[in-house]
Structures are given as structure tokens and as C-alpha cells.
């Protein structure tokens, strides 16, 4: 907060940008409240409208199904994706006290939770940056990111659909903080209780102590996380009945296994790419949907992730054995590369919740001016896209919508901007890691050991 006050006092440009961002935030929030509450009153959600679809048709429905002893996971085609519950049975059980509240009260609570989680996300990353101190200019740059943060399109998309992307991103932030400080109990809680039962791919930070050579902490973390996850599973089985719970877990793992096969991929016959910007979807959209193109997409993902794999092997062969606070840039480079690597591997990529965090970090730590210019050119339009969408809707109304979910003036439905941003950030982080003196010493030592 002190850096924000300092920047506010010293820069007129900052005062104008932040004031404009606050005004936009409040007006945009008013618009979202109006549409969200109106959608429930008019039953627009049940009729297929886009407002709060995930909350109403996935989360609330799953909690009701769980307590009624009904199947959580639909069989067959995933054509109507919103009707498919994608998380573990534990999520439906543990969150049911909130999800079964009266609709209007639930919506108010979810608004408070999303805004609170988003505010915590900003200030907790400032806390992580203050602890690690990767670069002296980062606090100032992070203060300048606040106007972008308030208008960030991921937040407004999350609030519209009432998804949990940003809430899970906050969980992952807490996990990263616990891991870099090597605090076992909170790391186990956030990993085993809050992340794995919901979105397992957000567990990427658990690999950081392994790559830094902090083996004792890593193996303790793995052991206690397994026990915590089993405890959550056991509580879920007792809550729903052992027979019912086991059947739902079997269906859950079956759902995950067939997700890529049954997903309604968009091929060349579709009018545009859509909002799923995964490598798989991009390949299938341009080359057609077939088993061959799916294998090609898997090969592309492996090739893209190979440099990160080589770095990981190098670190495992010659461990740094240093806590994150002693190698702050290497630690953050690794944790962000792991995050982006997880999303490159995913077959469904809708958002980049930590994108603004990585953007600020790279602005502070990347030396090449041209790299920073490219980052601005590619990331800024994605970050501020909500403004364009809102203006488009104000100008054209429902005519700008396609199937109630796609904004026809939105460049994201034609160009895979999210994946382009991911690949840009991933490439810059890999470049930094390859040039890190500590890793260079590791490379030289490894070559000496092998006689190369």
C-alpha cells in the first residue's frame, strides 16, 4: 500500500489512470450486479443465458445432486458442456453449505467472495514480491499494474459466469507463498484440501522445492498432502455414503479420462475458433477433428514443453539446494514456467488468471526493451478486453452476441490470443532460466561429471 501512496503522490499520470480505473470498476460492477440479479429474476439462467451459468448449472446443481444421492457426472457427449460437473465429489460436498443458500443470498455472497479474493490476490502477490525481492523496480511496477488489475478481463469474465478461476488462483497464490517460505502446514492445507479436490493442475507450485533441491521439505509436503487428500475423500464418503461416494469418484476419474475424447471440439466447419485457446483446440480448428490431428497436438505440446523438461532434469542432476529467498528470480521463473507449462498441456484453456502477475514480473526482470514492447502489444489488449466487449454490447446490444456466449466483435474468438500470451511469457521465462548464472553453473558441473 505504501508504494501505491508513493506513486499516487509523485505521478499525475498515475492518479488519472487509477482514478479512471476505479470509476470503471464501480460502473462495471453496477452493470454486472444489474444483469446478474436480473438474470435470476427473469429465469434467464435456466433458459440458457450466459450470466452465472457455472454457478447455477454446475456448482449449485452438483451440491443438490450430492445430497439427493444422484449422479454428479453425466455420461455420453459433452456437447452441452455447462451441464457437466467437472470437479471431484469433495467439492460438491465441502462447498454445499454455501451453494445451497437461497439464490439471491448466494449471489450476494459470491459477489463478495469474488471481489474479496481478487483484492487478496493483488495484495498477496505484493507480499510475495516483498519477501523474495526479485528486483528492486518490481514494487513500483506492481503499483502501476493496479489500474490494469481493476479492469482485467479475466476478473470480469469470472464474475459474469461466477466461476472459481480467480478463487483457485488465490489458493495457488497462498500455496506459492507457503512453498517459497517452506511452511509445511499451510502448504499441505492449500495443496491437499483446497486445490487437488477442485482443479489439480493448479498444484504446479508443489514441484518448486523439488527443482530447487529442497528434498526434505518436498517429500514431507508430498506425504502429508496425500494424507490430507485421503482425509478429504474419507469425509466426503462418510457424508454421502460410502457406496454412493465410491461410485461418484469412479465416475469422476472416468470423466477426466474421457474428457479430451468427448469434448465438443470446434473444427474448420465452425464460424470461428471460440474461447478455448488450448493447443489441442487450435490444431483441430485449423486441421480438422480426427485421432491423427489429436496425436499431432499432443506431439506439439511435448515439443513445446521439452525445454522445461530439460531444465528440470538438469536441476535434478545437480541440485541447487537453496531456499527460494536466496534465489528469488530463479524461484519465480520456475514457478511461473510451471504454471504456464501446465496450461500449455491442458486441452481446455479459457483464461490466464495470473497473467497480470507474470506480466508485471517480466516487465521488471526482462532486460531487452523489444521484449517488453512485445509484451505490451500482446498482453495489454487481452487484459483490457472487457472494456471493448462492454462498449460493443452498449453499441449493438444482443445483436453482437452469438449463441448468447460469444461477442462477435471480440478478437479472442478469432485469434488464440490467450495461448499466444502464454507462449510469449513461457519463452521469456525459459530464456531467463537458461541465462541464470546458478543454472549455468549447474550445466557446467553436469558436463564435468559426465566427461563431456
Image: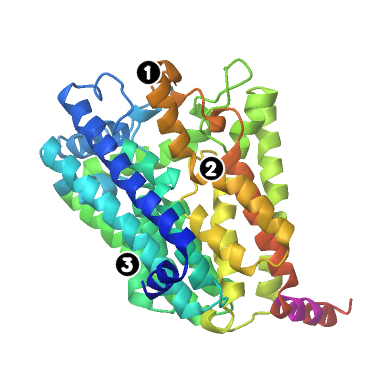
Q: Is residue 60 visible?
A: yes
- The residue wearing badge 1 is 398
Proximity of marks 1 and 2: CB atoms separated by less than 8 Å: no
Secondary structure type for disc 2: helix
Q: Which quarter of the picture shows residue 269?
A: top right
Q: Nearer the viewer, mark 3 or mark 1?
A: 1
Percent coordinates x, y for residue 330 in the rendering: 62, 73
Residue placed at 46% from the left, 52% from the top?
148
Q: Does 203 lie within the magenta span?
A: no
Marks 3 and 1, Cα distance to the nearest angstrom? 44 Å
Earlier-in-chain disc, 1 versus 2:
2
Proximity of marks 3 and 2: CB atoms separated by less than 8 Å: no
Percent coordinates x, y for residue 261 in the rendering: 53, 30
Earlier-in-chain disc, 3 versus 2:
3
Q: Nearer the viewer, mark 3 or mark 2?
A: 2
10 Å neighbourhood of mark 1: few (<14), some, or many (≥20)?
few
- The residue wearing badge 3 is 189
Q: Which residues are magenta?
A: 439-444
Name the side, left or right, on which 245 lies relative to 427: left
Q: Does 442 lie within the magenta span?
A: yes
In which quadrant of the rendered image does the C terminus lie? Answer: bottom right
Residue 382 circle label: 2
Secondary structure type for disc 3: helix
Marks 3 and 2, Cα distance to the nearest angstrom? 33 Å
Residue placed at 25% from the left, 25% from the top?
45
Amino acid at each position: 500500500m505504501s508504494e501505491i501512496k508513493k506513486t499516487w503522490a509523485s505521478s499525475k499520470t498515475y492518479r488519472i489512470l487509477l482514478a479512471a480505473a476505479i470509476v470503471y470498476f464501480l460502473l462495471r460492477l453496477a452493470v454486472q450486479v444489474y444483469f446478474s440479479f436480473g438474470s435470476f429474476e427473469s429465469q434467464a439462467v435456466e433458459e440458457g443465458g450466459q450470466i452465472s451459468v457455472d454457478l447455477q448449472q454446475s456448482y449449485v446443481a452438483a451440491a443438490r445432486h450430492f445430497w439427493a444421492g444422484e449422479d454428479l457426472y453425466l455420461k455420453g457427449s459433452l456437447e452441452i458442456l455447462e451441464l457437466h460437473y467437472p470437479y471431484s465429489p469433495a467439492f460438491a460436498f465441502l462447498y454445499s453449505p454455501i451453494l445451497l443458500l437461497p439464490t439471491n443470498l448466494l449471489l450476494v455472497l459470491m459477489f463478495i467472495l469474488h471481489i474479496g479474493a481478487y483484492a487478496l490476490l493483488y495484495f498477496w502477490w505484493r507480499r510475495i514480491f516483498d519477501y523474495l525481492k526479485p528486483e528492486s523496480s518490481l514494487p513500483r511496477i506492481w503499483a502501476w499494474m493496479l489500474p490494469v488489475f481493476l479492469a482485467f478481463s479475466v476478473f470480469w469474465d469470472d464474475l459474469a459466469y461466477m466461476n472459481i478461476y480467480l478463487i483457485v488462483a488465490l489458493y495457488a497464490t497462498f500455496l506459492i507463498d507457503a512453498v517459497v517460505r517452506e511452511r509445511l502446514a499451510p502448504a499441505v492445507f492449500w495443496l491437499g484440501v483446497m486445490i487437488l479436490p477442485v482443479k489439480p493442475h493448479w498444484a504446479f507450485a508443489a514441484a518448486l522445492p523439488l527443482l530447487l533441491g529442497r528434498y526434505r521439505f518436498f517429500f514431507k509436503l508430498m506425504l502429508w498432502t496425500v494424507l490430507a487428500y485421503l482425509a478429504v475423500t474419507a469425509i466426503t464418503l462418510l457424508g454421502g455414503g460410502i457406496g454412493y461416494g465410491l461410485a461418484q469418484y469412479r465416475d469422476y476419474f472416468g470423466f477426466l479420462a474421457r474428457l479430451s475424447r468427448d469434448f465438443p471440439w470446434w473444427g474448420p466447419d465452425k464460424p470461428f475458433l471460440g474461447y478455448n485457446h488450448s493447443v489441442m483446440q487450435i490444431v483441430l480448428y485449423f486441421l480438422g477433428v480426427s485421432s491423427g490431428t489429436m496425436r499431432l497436438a499432443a506431439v506439439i505440446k511435448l515439443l513445446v514443453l521439452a525445454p522445461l523438461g530439460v531444465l528440470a532434469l538438469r536441476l535434478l542432476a545437480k541440485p541447487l539446494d537453496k531456499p527460494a529467498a536466496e534465489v528469488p528470480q530463479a524461484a519465480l521463473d520456475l514457478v511461473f514456467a510451471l504454471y504456464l507449462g501446465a496450461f500449455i498441456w491442458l486441452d481446455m484453456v479459457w483464461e490466464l488468471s495470473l497473467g497480470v502477475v507474470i506480466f508485471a514480473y517480466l516487465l521488471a526482470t526482462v532486460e531487452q526493451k523489444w521484449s517488453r514492447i512485445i509484451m505490451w502489444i500482446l498482453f495489454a489488449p487481452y487484459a483490457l478486453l472487457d472494456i471493448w466487449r462492454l462498449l460493443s454490447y452498449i453499441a449493438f446490444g444482443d445483436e453482437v452476441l452469438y449463441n448468447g456466449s460469444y461477442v462477435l466483435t471480440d478478437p479472442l474468438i478469432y485469434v488464440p490470443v490467450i495461448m499466444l500470451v502464454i507462449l510469449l511469457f513461457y519463452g521469456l521465462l525459459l530464456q531467463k532460466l537458461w541465462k541464470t548464472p546458478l543454472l549455468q553453473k549447474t550445466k557446467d558441473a553436469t558436463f564435468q561429471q559426465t566427461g563431456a
